[in-house]
Amino acid sequence: GVKCGIVGLPNVGKSTLFNALSSAKAEAANFPFCTIEPNVGVVTVPDKRLQILEGLVNPQRVLPTVIEFVDIAGLVKGASKGEGLGNKFLGNIREVDAIIHVVRCFDDPNVVHVAGGVDPLFDKEVIDTELQLKDIESVDKKLLRIEKVAKSGDAKARKAVESLQKFKEGLKEGKNARAIEADEDDLKAIADIHLLTIKPVLYVANVDEGSIKEGNAHVDRLKEEVANENADVILLCAALEEQIAEFEEPEEKEMFLGEYGLEESGLNRLIAGAYKLLNLITYFTAGVQEVRAWTITRGWKAPAAAGVIHTDFEKGFIKAEVIKLKDFEAFKTEAICRENGKIAVEGKEYVVCDGDIMHFRFNV
Ligand code: GDP
């Protein structure tokens, strides 16, 4: 599954956001996994298309696709040097697919700021620096390993040393690896050291409830700062999200959102943002027993997509029958889709599209 790590300085609203995410998971009544560690929450990906399919197929159960969020607390200045539990937490980041970096953009005299004043750029820099220091350590380790090989005249190793040095330079200048210009060879040279600052990032500006739509001066500064990282900034109010997540009835939730002039909760925007960030799409399987959403990376071909359901589906892949959701909505049943030529039979080279309804045929 897809895993996102929530990072940020203490007191910026990480736990509040994580709690909101955790109570939102209650929406999935028939969710298959339930035991999770205290700092790991599994959130269902809201998708209106599932309700459409449910209405058409009337299945016994509906299973949305999910994203895992990990609350990575304890990142403070000095973490990369092993202060506090810092090093352990940095290790947690290595395991995630994407980073959600929460930055405090709300003024509230009652909430103490670790550095004395609200300053999103300062906050971001403290966290970035720790991650960059850790990355420099990783680069140095690899350099140590291959510099000898390079000196013995190995051309490939020499090229790799150049690439690693380029990353080291950039990191030392305070750049995140994702913002360092790199070609394919450079990326190959660092592929096995899993740098932290190359992971895709989404910034969450935690604002007061009056600034969700328009933002504020803190948000403007943050946006300007991250422009070169090609990263999105999502505005939400974590304290408000905690309240929104409490509502069980969708109508109540909508009304509450309406009072703040919002159409969607920040959590839903965050989940959608993570999906977009990781270039993920959803396909569906729709049977009378189960209507289900599956997550794949955009561009995956049918066998790889089938492998998400079961590795046997991928190994024994023969073909896939594909119905477009629009056609299914128009013709209502698989049989009528078939009569109208709306079921495409696709082979191994078919690139699965967002919203496809898939039926795989395979050998066992
Ligand atoms: P963490 O240390 O990053 O996990 O931060 P917490 O989630 O524990 O939040 C720190 C404090 O800030 C708590 O007292 C929260 O109630 C408060 N807080 C979190 N989000 C917001 C917010 O959006 N607005 C306001 N005013 N306070 C918030």
Image: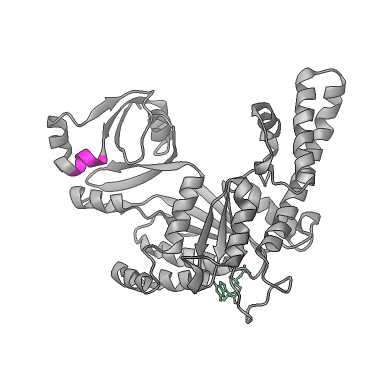
Which quarter of the picture shows residue 39? bottom right
100 is within the stretch colored magenta: no
Q: How many marks?
A: 0
Q: Is residue 183 left or right of residue 307?
A: right
Determine if residue 1 is in view: no
How far across and down, in percent of the image, does residue 95 sit?
Answer: 61, 47
Q: Is residue 191 left or right of residue 355?
A: right
How far across and down, in percent of the image, does residue 163 sit?
Answer: 75, 31
Above or below residue 327? Residue 54 is below
Seen as rendered, the residue at the extreme bottom is 110
* Residue segment shown in magenta: 325-329
Name the residue: 17% across, 28% down. 341
How far across and down, in percent of the image, does residue 275 sit?
Answer: 46, 48
Determine if residue 327 is in view: yes
Name the foreground residue: 1 vs 36. Answer: 1
Rendered-image quarter of ligand 1: bottom right
Name the residue: 70% across, 34% down. 190
Name the foreground residue: 145 vs 247. Answer: 247
Which quarter of the picture shows residue 364? top left
Name the residue: 38% across, 26% down. 316
Above or below residue 206? Residue 282 is above
Name the residue: 43% across, 32% down. 300
By secondary structure, the bulk of the magenta-drawn segment is best described as helix
326 is within the stretch colored magenta: yes
